[in-house]
């Protein structure tokens, strides 16, 4: 279930999820929890109005999906995170870390 992409996402939200899923697969980063949440299902305070909610705390993928994860799991090496940020930017979206456990994807 981990990188399953919700059917109801917008085109850009779906593209962002595909980029993240592919990136994590390429770098053998995993998660045992549900990573992608449709923002319409989200009731949290941070991430409202986004294209996609990305859950990352406690997963191996956290090292690429958040700055905190890069710091804690990569010893401060942000290169994976920065590489993913660049790929998302090329698709016209950006990732914003909302809390230690989730981030949101927004249109540039």
Image (tube, rainbow, N blue to C red):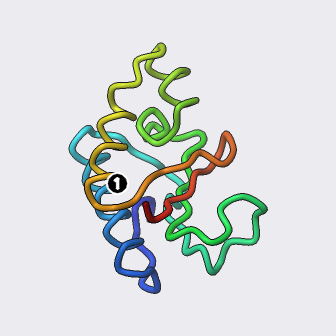
Q: Which residue is mark 1?
A: 20
Give the residue at the far bottom of this rendering. Answer: 8
| Image quadrant in which the C terminus is located | bottom left
Residue at (49, 60) in percent of width and height: 105
Q: Is residue 53 above or below residue 74?
A: below
Mark count: 1
Residue at (75, 71) in percent of width and height: 43
Front residue of 15/5: it is 15
Residue at (42, 84) in percent of width and height: 7
Q: Is residue 76 above or below residue 86?
A: above
Left or right of residue 68, residue 9 in this image = left
Crowd around label 1: few <14 · some 14–19 · many ≥20 (10 Å): many
Quadrant of the image occupied by residue 27: top left
Residue 92 placed where, x, y %? 33, 61
Badge 1 element = helix
Q: Is residue 56 above or below residue 92?
A: above
| Image quadrant in which the N terminus is located | bottom left
Give the residue at the far front of this rendering. Answer: 108
Residue at (66, 48) in percent of width and height: 98
Give the residue at the far top of this rendering. Answer: 75
Residue 74 placed where, x, y %? 44, 20
Residue 37 placed where, x, y %? 55, 69
Quadrant of the image occupied by residue 90: bottom left
Front residue of 73/88: it is 88
Front residue of 12/20: it is 12
């Amino acid at each position: 279930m981990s990188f399953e992409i919700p059917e109801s996402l917008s085109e850009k939200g779906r593209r962002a999820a595909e980029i993240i899923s592919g990136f994590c697969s390429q770098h053998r980063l995993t998660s045992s929890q549900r990573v992608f949440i449709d923002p319409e299902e989200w009731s949290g305070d941070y991430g409202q109005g986004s294209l996609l909610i990305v859950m990352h705390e406690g997963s191996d993928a956290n090292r690429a999906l958040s700055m905190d994860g890069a710091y804690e799991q990569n010893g401060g090496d942000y290169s994976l995170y920065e590489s993913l940020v660049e790929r998302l930017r090329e698709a016209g979206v950006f990732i914003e870390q909302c809390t230690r456990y989730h981030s949101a994807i927004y249109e540039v």
